[in-house]
Amino acid sequence: MLSHLHKQLLNDFQHDFPLSSRPYQDIADTLGVTENEVLVAFNELNAKHFISRIGPVISPNHIGASALVAMAVPEQHLQDVADKISSYPEVNHNYEREHRFNLWFVVIASDAVHLNDVINEIEQKTSFKALRLPMLDDFFIDLGFKLDLTNA
């Protein structure tokens, strides 16, 4: 069950997250709660898998290097491989698709060498070949979602 504070955090800070030395205090001041309450609520949202990270979205290859990667993974190995991939801090998300290449993920690294090292290591640790997909066109899809705050 999401509290009113959980919903406010999810609604109000998908965009325009405060850029300051104490962003959680800034959020607390905006919402009329304590910084600790904000931190606890974000930790609860993370533990319940409502959020997986708090961080910027940077256009691909403007800072560092990135790649969209796909793998063909047998169903019985899919969760194990996805968990291994998700353990890398350079991977910001992965997801299953209905296709022969059924596991897709994005890797972001400081440079092309590090990027290739991470993908090569993922291939070694999972025993599956990675298909690296170059970005031909840049599309930005804003994935902000509004929650109903009246039932909190």
Image (cartoon, grey):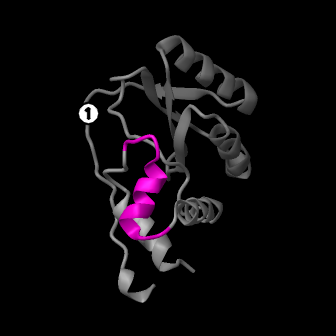
| Residue 73 visible here | no
Q: What kind of residue is marked 1?
A: Asp
Using the image as rendered, state which of residue 136 and residue 20 is in the foreground: 20
What percent of the width, then of the height, locates residue 83? Answer: 69, 45
Quadrant occupied by the N terminus = bottom right
Instruction: Name the residue that disc number 1 marks.
Output: 138
* Up-down relation of residue 71 to residue 47 (above or below): above
**Residue for point 53% across, 11% down:** 113
Residue at the extreme bottom of the image, as rendered = 151
Is 27 within the magenta?
Answer: yes
**Residue for point 46% across, 55% down:** 25
* Up-down relation of residue 137 to residue 115 (above or below): below
Using the image as rendered, state which of residue 111 and residue 53 is in the foreground: 53
**Residue for point 72% across, 33% down:** 126
**Residue for point 47% across, 69% down:** 33
Dot 1: what SS? loop
Magenta region? 19-33
